[in-house]
Each structure stands twice: as structure tokens, then as C-alpha cells.
Amino acid sequence: MIKTLGVLAHQKTFIEDYTTRHLALVAGYGSGKTFAFCLKALDMASRNVGYLGVLMEPTNTMLEETLFPMWEQILEENGIPYTVKKSSPRRYTLYFKDGKTIISMRSAENYARIAGLNLAFVGIDEMDTIKPAIADLCWKQCQARIRKGNVRQLFTTSTPEGYGFLYNHFEKNGHKKGRRLIRARTIDNPFLPEDYIEDLMDTYPPELIKAYLNGEFTNLTQGVVYPSFNRYESHTEYDFDWVLQQEKQYPHNPKFKLHIGQDFNVGKCYSGIHIIIDQIPYAIAELENSKNTEHVIQRVQELYPDRTIIFYPDSSGKNERSNASQTDITLLKNAGFHLDYPTKNPFIRNRVGSVNARLLNANNERRYFINTHKCPTLTESFEQQTYDKTGMPDKANDVDHPLDACGYFIHRRYPLKKNNIRKIQLTGM
């Protein structure tokens, strides 16, 4: 059994509850969820010597980047002998005084592959980042496989993501026998840097602070997608004529760079044209309904010659097009433009969150402005896009193209910060 000296109160409560069949720790960023998750798993392994357990992250990437490093660090810090089989799925064999426990690490998106296993416990980290329908099936599959062991339990840790699986299972139906939700706030961790919470307030929009700072369930997938946009308060008078005037008035200053968020669609390509002043982005023009990438290139070169231009394209544009031998991104490169894009597009909720945080953060500050006269299509898209029945931004009426394009730019330059901080040490075994 592990000793919980040095852990926070909510972590201790979570780790030491081994009688509740379905257990959840729902908390804000920086509250030590994944650390508590690993300690909980280690405690369950020590109580179930001779049996098999499973730990899950939503994706294989999260296993690699989040769980494996922290899990191995905790084992080594506490002197737990172990061996690891790094094939897929990765398997850890932990050696205790009275025997060994095997833990299999898997992605929740492949939950069906645990069929046939006899498990003592299952832990799922960041459960609410999984689509609710898949999360429900995953939970039920795990529940069905927990049938052997000394202490049998299904547990999870997560930041709440709207009214999803955790809300339905642990809040709405929390009265059902064998369920317990433990809630914690970011402020409950006194070991965080002094400016950590201030930084979150500066980074996130108000509707996300309830979830990401206080661990509260809040509506993230209904109504308009960009509730903080206001065509008056978000307006700027900056346009390209103003840019030319400034450059004429101050000829010794560097010329303005143009930052173009780009969405590719046959016959409906959209280019959102921005400048950046003192780290504040301004949308000063738009090019809509370009026929294809070649047409985008032609229009941009004609309108903005002899200027440094950086495109922030849809990352799927690097794939081969069915009607051409070159990719959209290759065409932009060959035209001499600078490009800035990730290997794959960000999660939609992260892109939307980044834009909302710039439109208005929790400190009531606006840090993204749009010339609503020069960008009427973008303006209307901000005002009109709503969530569909699946909780995703609605793609009806073609309002998504401008928002996707500008979202690629904003997320690339101003992504939401998600700091992983751990300053708590576990003492003893």
C-alpha cells in the first residue's frame, strides 16, 4: 500500500478510496490530476498482487507524452522494481514483496481490445476529452472486464469538458449506488507558481474558466460558438489602406507582414488577412470564394505585391488533391510564401477555445479585433455559427470556412496554454 504523506487533500481522498466501485476526480488545470491518477494506480497494483490492471489515456499520443513519463518517474522515485514490454500495448510488471502485478497501458479509443481480459482495476485519465458516446461504451466495456482481484475498481481523473460523460455518470446520476465524484479546484494546489492562476485567467475565455480553474461542469457545446464576439467592441478601423499610410509616413520602419489564415475548399477557399501590432492580431481584409489554391495565390500576389506574407493553412492541405499532382501547401510554398502550420490540425475545441480567449478572456480583455466593414463574411460567421446536435460547430450555411481559416492562424500564434505542473513528492511505500 502506498503512503500518501505529502499529497494534497483531494489527491489523498481519491487515492485512499478503494471501496467505491466507480470513482472520479474532476478538477481544474494544475490540480495534480494525472499525478493522483498514477499514485492511485500504484496503490491499486499493490492491493491486487497477482492480478492484471489497465490504465488508459484517450489517445496513443497522450500515452506517450503524458502517462508513460510520469508513471515511470513515480515508480523510480519510490523504488518500485519493474520491467516493461514496450510493444503495443505496453505492459509493466511491478514487483512487490508478496508477488507481482501486471499493468497494461492502452488508448481509450481502442477500448474494444480489452475484450476477453479479466481485470482487477481500470483507470482512465482525461475521460471527458473522449466523445461522450465513445466514453460511455468504453466505460461499460471496462466495467464488464473487472471481475477478479482483491480490490476491484474503475476510476478516472479529468478536467470537465461540458455536459459530457462525467456529468451524466457522476453528477446527474451520482445518486446511484457505487459512484463518487471528488471535485478539486486549481487554487487547491498551494505549490503552483504565484502567477499560474493569473496566467490561466489571462489565457482562457470566461466560459472555460469555470471548467479549467474550478472543475465545474459548464455548457461548452450549446448556443453560439463564439459568444464573446461583438461587432462593435471587437471592431477595428485598421485596414490595408491604413497599413500603406503608416508605411508612407514612417518609411524607415519595417513593412507590415501579412498573416493569412487559409481554409481550402473547391470554389469556396477563404483567406483571412491579418496584421499583428504589439502581439495583438487584427483582421483587416478577407478574400472569399476563391476557386482553388492557384486562384488564392493569384489574388494575394495581385493585391499585396512585394510584401512578406505568412500563410497559416489547413494542415490537411498537405495531402494529395484528387485533381492535381501538387498539394495545396506545396503550391503556396512554390509561390514564395512563408508557411506556418502544425503536422496535423488542432482539435476543434482547442482551436475554438483559442479564438474565444482572444476575443475576450476571463479578465475581460479583448485581444483580437476584426474590421467588420472589410470582413463582413467573417463578422457574420462569428455571429451566426452555433453548435449542432452532436456538440460540434455547425457547418451548415458555409459559415465555418472563415472561422476555420482564422482559427488556424489564431491557434498557431496564440494557442491555449495547458501547463503540466507537479511539485508534490510521494514519500515511501
Image (tube, grey):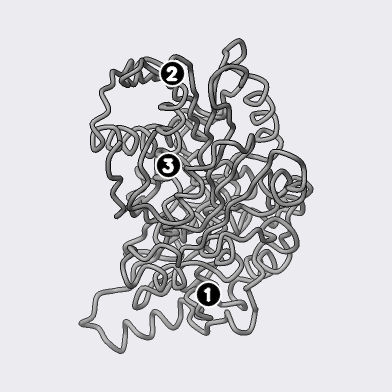
User: Front-most of 358 and 6?
Assistant: 6
Q: Which mark is residue 178?
A: none
The residue where tag 1 is placed is: 362
Element type at mark 3? helix
Name the N-terminal-most of marks 1 and 3: 3
Residue 32: give x, y in percent of width and height. Answer: 41, 52
Residue 117: give x, y in percent of width and height. Answer: 57, 13
Element type at mark 2? loop
Residue 5: give x, y in percent of width and height. Answer: 34, 50
Left or right, 24 with respect to 280, comes to: right
Name the N-terminal-most of marks 2 and 3: 2
Amino acid type indicated by mark 1? Ala
Amino acid type indicated by mark 3? Ile
User: Front-most of 108 and 38?
Assistant: 38
Label 1 to label 2: alpha-carbon separation: 41 Å
Question: Where is the C terminus found, in terms of image quarters?
Answer: top left
Name the N-terminal-most of marks 1 and 2: 2
Question: Where is the N terminus found, in terms of image quarters?
Answer: top left
Residue 179: give x, y in percent of width and height. Answer: 68, 42
Left or right, 19 with respect to 201, comes to: right
The residue where tag 3 is placed is: 329
Is the C-beta separation of discs 2 and 3 under 8 Å? no
Left or right, 287 with respect to 384, comes to: left
Is the C-beta separation of discs 1 and 2 under 8 Å? no
Q: Residues within 10 Å of mark 1 (few under 14, many from 20)?
A: some
Q: Residues within 10 Å of mark 2 (few under 14, many from 20)?
A: few
Task: Tell me what residue is drawn at x 49 percent, y 34 percent.
Answer: 57
Q: Which mark is residue 89?
A: 2
Amino acid type indicated by mark 2? Pro
Label 1 to label 3: alpha-carbon separation: 36 Å
Q: Residues within 10 Å of mark 3 (few under 14, many from 20)?
A: many
